[in-house]
Amino acid sequence: MFGADAVGCDISAFNCLLARVKTAEYSLGALELDLRGVLEQARTSAGSTAGASEWLLAWYSPQALGELLAYRRAARRLAPAHRAVAHVVLSRAARSARLTTHFDLDGPRAPVTAPYLCRKHKRECRPVEEATKFLARYTADTIARLREYAAVRTKREVLVVHGDARRVRLAVQPTGVITSPPYPGLIDYHEQHRYAYELLQLKDRRTDEIGPAAAGRSAGALAAYVKSMTQAFRNVSRRLAPRSAVLIVVNDSQDLYPRILAGAGLVLDERITRHVNRRTGRRAGEFFEDVLVCRTA
């Protein structure tokens, strides 16, 4: 939006899908017709859960899963760009339609199949049994969001690379970097979006994640995180001209980034602390991050 070409790299196929869909250019009228057509076709053909994985069968009611799978089948007839948008609609609906509590959509640990006391609604609630209402809601919302973005979209090029930042070789030379890297031992990104990987049958590269929650925060895990992030920043630094800007948004509670920056050959010019006050769900609460204003030597 400020007139720059952009290139991004992520190990998560789902994150790459989101980035491509959000930044692509569409014929919005044709896209809306396709999405509404898929929604209607799914409504009239839902029911079968044949071929679903054990994970999907455990985390969705038969009705909800049948509706999601019907939508997936209907989306297959679309051209690739429109199919990608439909897959985002499907993944948004799948997140909401899981057998979990209303107050724990971020990281539920086990399916909920019985009524429960809901912290969000302050009453007894039941697990979700359907997905069609979410498919309809997110079809309309996704179209509205893409129309809003199209009004301000420039003609600059956006390239999204599904790869490992420690080893990727970009086809272009960036002039600067803005990034928010993973925090050690906090989130398992592939598992967080398991519903999308299962439904869309995306390539799972969780073993290549840097600092996953599953690895914990032991001394060994933190050492591995420092090594991996140093490799990632060193790799990108090699592609930058001297004194290029590198902005890193991070909560460095373990004080790891002085070592990472030094190992990657980056110079810290300024550290700006920002209050993150737009958090939702069970993660809501006081939280602060630092913006590390760095440059190549």
Image (spheres, rainbow, N blue to C red):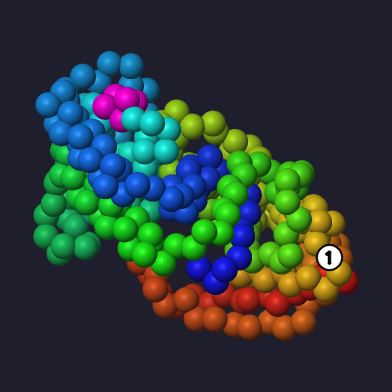
Q: Which residue is at 38% across, 48% downward?
A: 26
Answer with left or right where residue 276 lies relative to residue 182: left
**The C terminus, quarter of image:** bottom right
| Vertical arrangement, residue 22 with respect to residue 286, above or below | above
Answer with left or right where residue 190 lies relative to residue 169: left
Number of residues whose C-alpha sits closer than 10 Å to that of mark 1, classed few (under 14), some (14–19) or many (20 or more): some
Give the secondary structure at mark 1. loop
The magenta stretch is: 73-77
Residue 110 horizontal/vertical position (percent): 34, 40
User: How many marks on residues?
Assistant: 1
| Vertical arrangement, residue 139 with respect to residue 277, above or below | above
Q: Name the residue beneath numbered marker 1.
A: 241
Residue 164 horizontal/vertical position (percent): 69, 43
Dividing the picture into quadrants, the one containing residue 117 is: bottom left
Q: Which residue is at 61% across, 70% downward?
A: 249
Work out whether residue 26 or residue 16 is closer to the camera in this orientation and state it: 26
Residue 258 horizontal/vertical position (percent): 79, 71
Q: Which residue is at 86% across, 69% downward?
A: 242
Work out whether residue 66 or residue 241 is closer to the camera in this orientation and state it: 241
Q: Amino acid at mark 1?
A: Ala
Work out whether residue 60 or residue 94 is closer to the camera in this orientation and state it: 94
